[in-house]
Amino acid sequence: MALTEPILAVRDLNAWYGESHVLHGIEFEVHRSECVSLLGRNGAGRTTTLRSILGLTDRRTGRVCVFGEDTARWPTHRIARLGVGFCPEERGIFSALTCEENLMLPPVLKNSQMAMSVEEIYEIFPNLYERRRSPGMKLSGGEQQMLALGRILRTGASLLLLDEISEGLAPVIVQTLARAIKRLKSKGYTILLVEQNFRFAAPLSDRMLVIEHGQVVETINRSELGEKMPRLQELLGV
């Protein structure tokens, strides 16, 4: 892959929740149409990395460049308007709204060429079409996860921050999400994926970054996976 200016560049990023110093100078880049996975044990700082990119931690220092803009001091809503979509672990589905109303709720970014129509989202996730009139509270966990991803695709965001989207889901749903991510990559979306499920993340990822104690301790390119598997097993216990 030819390296151009990165879509996301994180430099010496430190982050705190209250007095707790969680990220300790983390650094990495993500380029257009890449899928980069953040791997690590619980509490390593993976989700905090996503939240820090969006300015959702109590305090952060360092540089975060999104689409060439230094956003380290920007409020969250301004960062989102650049074209950043966040799919949090808790999904944030509105339980009283139908599936389709949830999809229609977010605004579409101005001048975005990436916004998907509801019909395109239903093509990727046929389950959502079948459940389009069902209230959010009646959707299964897998359907809620597909809806959470579909909702940010409709906004036109092209940098997707996905937090543990495979967690606790049936294998058939996990396979559907994997196919969706491959399709999004082929369409030019850029994806930063936080995952505990190594077997889900590895086939999708161009690179995997292992995080320990708020720092990147290992970077593994897809082509290096075989030779570095013992090191990965040591770090992750997979």
Image: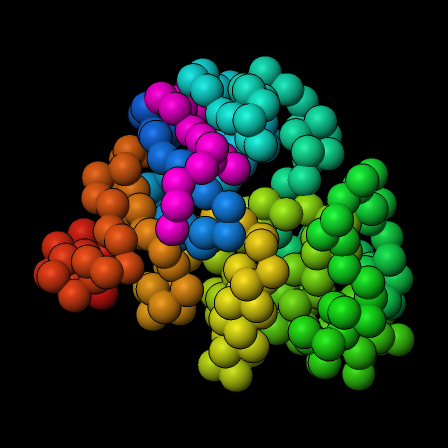
| Position in image of residue 30 (x %, y %) | 44, 41
| Position in image of residue 228 (x %, y %) | 14, 57
Occupied quadrant, residue 216: top left
Occupied quadrant, residue 188: bottom right
Question: What residue is drawn where x is 29% and y is 42%?
Answer: 211
Image position of 118 (left or right of 55): right
The foreground one among 101 and 177 is 177
| Position in image of residue 77 (x %, y %) | 72, 30
**Above or below 70: residue 234:** below
Quadrant including the C terminus:
bottom left
The magenta stretch spans which residues?
Answer: 1-21
Magenta region includes residue 204: no
**Above or below 171: residue 230:** above
Image position of 8 (left or right of 11): right
Res. 143 in view = yes
Magenta region includes residue 13: yes
